[in-house]
Structure formats: structure tokens, C-alpha cells
Image: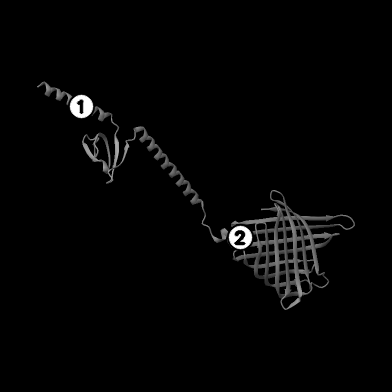
Amino acid sequence: MQSYFKVLVLAGVLTGAASVLAEDAVPQIFELKNGDRITATIQSQSETNMVVLTPFGGTLTLPLDQITKQSPLPSPEEIAAEAEKAAKAATDKAAETTEAEVEEAKKVPETFAGKFFSNLAGEVQLGLDAGYGASDYMNYYGRVKASHGVERWKSLWDGKLTYGKNKGVVSADKLDTSYRLEYDAIQDKLFLYGEPTGGYDTIRNIDYYFTAGGGLGYHILKKDNVVFDASAGASHQSYHYKNEGSRNDLYVDLGESLTWEIVKNLNFLEKFTYSPKANDWNVYRITFEAGLSWGFYKNMTFNFTLIEKYDSRPAAGIDRNDLQLVSSIGLKF
């Protein structure tokens, strides 16, 4: 009888110890091959099985070969930290989404016209030449240049106005304007162009003139600091003179142009056009322009330009040659 009592006492002690150990054991999360996740506390383990105690007080026997992952149950502090981290991430994402929606709402639908004029650049030049002495004179010079383009399109506008007096008598009064539209048919190689021009020259007895032409051009050299082009085309030229009526003829246009950045802020520009009359190459017009542009302060430039215009058949009593030397201060925009 005493032996039996001792066995019962020993069994109670072992059961109590097991309960204490079970209560002190850290709960585990078991992931099984079938996708189940079980939270339980380990009771015992053999070579093939593991007995665990679930939070509901029941026990389960888990085959070891069915357990794919086993990890401790996170502490309340860790769970709170993860929840705070997830909440912050959700808040940040919502804020980013809102900012993106606001920026998207600000965007105006892009049209071809909008893109065409978005890349706009230009320059205004003003010059004054004056002399006082045996022959007093004063010449004013103004020029406006603008360029813009998009994708393969490029547009150039140029307007030059000169007015001057010598001993109180008008010695210069002329305007020359041109607009040129180019399209790169073959990127960085072949381009098409159209170019109307117009103006007047009171001293050369030209009430007004206008031309309309176009043709093909080729980029002989195109690098970051130098561009050299050649072109060939035709134009209809209409000149209206004060005392001779008008002349309307078809001309062939052969030209070249060079833009060279010699060093930073110092550029050389040159353009030459030879235009013989289509049915009589003994009648022709030549336009040559060359100049230096120096960016001396921010967007301000100093410019020195030579402009030569030659007409083999000018108005009666007018020289064939018209040479102009101009210095000016420019403001780029």
C-alpha cells in the first residue's frame, strides 16, 4: 500500500512539473506542408513526432516531417512595433499617391502646337554708330532673332532694321526679314526647308520685296560645337522699285551656313547664298553674312557683324554692292 502511494505522489509531482514547464514555455508558430499555421506550446518531442499544447487546452501530435517552419510567437511589443510600421508605410503611400494625383491634375494635355513653341529661344540686338566732325552721321541698328522647334521640326525667324542720317539727310532706311522652317527628313543628315523673306530698302529704291522658296539641305558636319550645312533649292522673287515697276522671276538658290563655338561664350556665324536667275545665270544676287558673338555677362552679348548684299542688276543709278558693318549689344531670352 505504501509503495502504491509513493507512485501516486511521484506521478503528481511529475505532472505538476510538466504543467509548470508548459506554462513557462514560449509559444511557437508551426507552418505545415499543407499550408496550415498552428500556434502552440511544445509539450514533448520524439524522433518522429512532436506533442504540442494549443491555446484552447487541447494537445496535438505533429509529425516532424510535416513541419516546414517553426518560429517563436512575437512579443506584444514586437507586434505593436510591426503594426506601427505598417500604419506609417500605409500613410506615406497614401500621401505619395495624393501628391502624384495633384501633380497629374496640374498637367495640361500636351498638343503639337504646345510642344512646338515650348523650346523657344531668341535674342534682341541694338547698335548705334555715330560720328561728329566734317560729316555728322548717326546710324541705328536693331535685330531680333528667334528659334523654336520640336522633335524633327525647327523654326528660325530673323528681322534686321537699319536707319541712319548723314548731315541731316537719310542715308540708311531698310528692313530685311526672313522665316525658315526645317524638317529633318533623315535625322542629322538630310533636311527639307521652306523660307519666305521680305522687306524694303529706301536708299536702293526698293519699295518692298518678298520671296518664297524652299529646297533640300544636308548636314555636312554636325557636332556639339560646330554645324556646317549646305542647301539647294529655288525661290520666286518679287522686287518692286520706286521708278521701274516690279520684277518677278524664278531664281535658283545655292547656299551654305556655318555655326562654330570657338570657345565657351564665343561663337562664329557665317551664311552665304548665291541666287542666279533660273533662265539667265548672268543675272544673280549674293547675300553673305559673317559675325562674332561674345557672351560677356550672363545673357548679354557683344556682336560684330558684316553683311554684304550684291545685286548684278540693281535699280537704275544704284551701286551693285551694299556693305554693312555693325556692332551691337544683344540680350538673349
Residue at (26%, 41%) from the top-left corner? 64
Q: Which residue is mark 1?
A: 14
Q: Position of residue 14 (x, y in %)?
A: 20, 26
Crowding at dot 2, Cα within 10 Å, few <14 / some 14-19 / many 20+, comes out as many
User: Dot 1: within a 10 Å radius of its alpha carbon, few (fewer than 14), some, or many (20 or more) residues?
Assistant: few
Q: Quadrant of residue 230?
A: bottom right
Q: Is residue 49 left or right of residue 296?
A: left
- How far across and down, in percent of the image, does residue 45 sit? 24, 35
Secondary structure beneath label 2: strand
Above/below status of 49 relative to 269: above
Asked whether 40 or 270 is in front, the reply is 40
Report the amino acid beneath label 1.
Answer: Leu
Q: Residue at x 20, y 24 (%)?
A: 13
From this viewpoint, which residue is outermost toward the top? 2
Looking at the image, is 112 positioned above or below residue 302?
Answer: below
The answer to whether marks 2 and 1 mark residues whose Cβ atoms lie closer than 8 Å is no
